Image (cartoon, grey):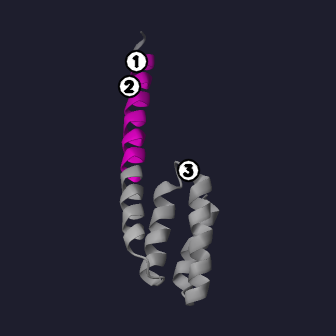
Amino acid sequence: MKKGLKKMAYVAVTLLLIFGAKAWGQQRMADSLLLVLEKYRREDTVRVNRMNDLAYAVYMNNSAMAEEYAREVGSLSDKLGYPKGKARSLWLQGLA
């Protein structure tokens, strides 16, 4: 194998490993946030922030789910009068 191709293959494998590890870590974060939200039922700014965190954690792997979470948290933010939560939910909808 030529030296240039060998180097390119090495870089490609390294990038795949890095991004694969990041996706795995985000899934673990999403699972943890889901558990927290199952136990925390109060509709307040804490829930809004955790739901926004969840939407961000899943957006790279499942943009439809991230958009659904972001819309839900946007509605809750409106209900609570929490503009910071609403702004982040709109930003997340844009990402998804």
Task: Look at the numbered discs 1 and 2 and tell me whether their residues touch, using CB distance below 8 Å.
Answer: yes
Q: Residue at x 59, y 53 (%)?
A: 63
Local crowd size for mark 2, using a 10 Å CA cut-off: few (<14), some (14–19), many (≥20)? few
Q: What element carries label 3?
A: loop
Q: Is residue 14 above or below residue 63?
A: above
**Amino acid type, residue under disc 1 in the picture:** Lys
* Mark nearer the N terminus (3 vs 1): 1
Q: How crowded is mark 1: few (under 14 residues within 10 Å), some or many (20 or more)?
A: few
Q: In which quarter of the image is the N terminus?
A: top left
Q: Residue 22 magenta-drawn?
A: yes
Q: In which quarter of the image is the C terminus?
A: bottom right
Highlighted range, magenta: 4-26
Whole-angstrom CA distance, mark 2 to mark 3, is 28 Å
Q: Check the image and report above or below for 58 versus 33.
A: above
Q: Distance between the residues labelled 3 and 1?
A: 33 Å
User: What mark, if any, has residue 10 been given in the picture?
Assistant: 2
User: What is the crowding at mark 3: few (fewer than 14 residues within 10 Å), some, or many (at least 20)?
Assistant: few
What residue appears at the point 39 percent right and 56 percent down from the top-left corner? 31
Q: Residue furthest bottom?
A: 81
Q: x%, y% of residue 16?
A: 42, 34
Q: Position of residue 14 (x, y in %)?
A: 37, 32
Query: Percent from the top left, x then y, of residue 20?
Result: 41, 39
> In the image, what residue type sits under mark 2?
Tyr
Marks 1/2: CA distance? 6 Å
In the structure shown, which secondary structural element does the residue marked by tag 1 occupy? helix
Q: Residue lying farthest top?
A: 1
Q: Mark 3 points at which residue?
A: 62
Tell me which secondary structure the magenta stretch mostly adopts.
helix
Residue 6, numbered label: 1
Residue at screen point 64% across, 63% down: 94
Q: Which mark is residue 17?
A: none
